[in-house]
Image (spheres, grey):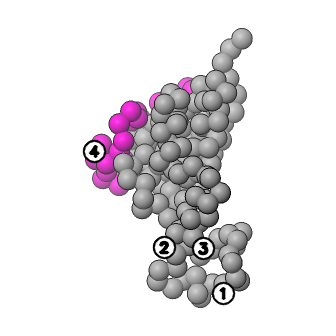
Amino acid sequence: MTTKKMAIIATKGTLDWAYPPLILSSTAAALGWDVQVFCTFYGLQLLRKDLSGIKISPLANPAMPMPVPMPVVVQMLPGMESMATMMMKSKMKSKGVASLDELRSVCLESDVRFIACQMTVDLFEFQKSDFIDGIDYGGAATFMKFAGEADVCLYI
């Protein structure tokens, strides 16, 4: 029996977009799958040492459940992003949802391979010291061989 493979391209860096690649990759790894996550553009946020700056934006996010209906003009006010992030993190904690740090640690312990897009690292002038240990750096070609053989390929 061959091991199933899952390839994920993570391109977003907000709280609501950071969870799916980590949940899916940790779940697949727990099922014994070989998993690689290629983090490019804003998806590089998943690999930064400090995840505390990852926020959620209520602006242009009409599906986001709010305690009360909020006009777009209110969503644009300073501090609304921080407030929405605080509310979401509080709700997640109260429901027992793992933090991004916890999920990322599970992924690393489960041998999920994270690849930081070298082109994006260079584009945004990041330093390797900005990122956690245990990740790889490479271009799209580094990821393509694995993705081409994967049973499941996801773009998030």
Q: Position of residue 104 (x, y in %)?
A: 50, 42
Residue 66 higher or lower than 20, as above or below: below
Q: Earlier in the sequence, mark 2 or mark 4?
A: 2
Residue 22 higher or lower than 54, as above or below: above
Q: Secondary structure at mark 4?
A: helix
Q: Which mark is residue 82?
A: 2
Figure disc tally: 4
Q: Which mark is residue 129?
A: 4
Q: Which mark is residue 111?
A: none
Q: Residue at x 47, y 39 (%)?
A: 105
Label 2 close to label 3 by CB (< 8 Å): no
Q: Earlier in the sequence, mark 1 or mark 2?
A: 1
Q: Magenta segment: does it hold 130?
A: yes
Q: Which of the 4 quarters of the picture holds residue 146?
A: top right
Left-right relation of 134 to 96: left
Q: Residue at x 60, y 37 (%)?
A: 25
Q: Which residue has dot 3 on it? A: 58
Q: Amino acid at mark 2?
A: Ser
Q: Which residue has dot 1 on it? A: 71
Residue 152 visible somewhere in the drawing: yes
Q: Position of residue 22 (x, y in %)?
A: 57, 44
Q: Amino acid at mark 4?
A: Ser
Gap between marks 2 and 3, in whole Å? 10 Å
Q: Which residues are magenta?
A: 121-147
Q: Earlier in the sequence, mark 3 or mark 1?
A: 3
Label 1: few (<14), some (14–19) or many (≥20) C-alpha neighbours in 10 Å: few
Q: Position of residue 2 (x, y in %)?
A: 68, 14
Q: Earlier in the sequence, mark 3 or mark 4?
A: 3
Q: Earlier in the sequence, mark 2 or mark 3?
A: 3
Q: Residue at x 59, y 36 (%)?
A: 26
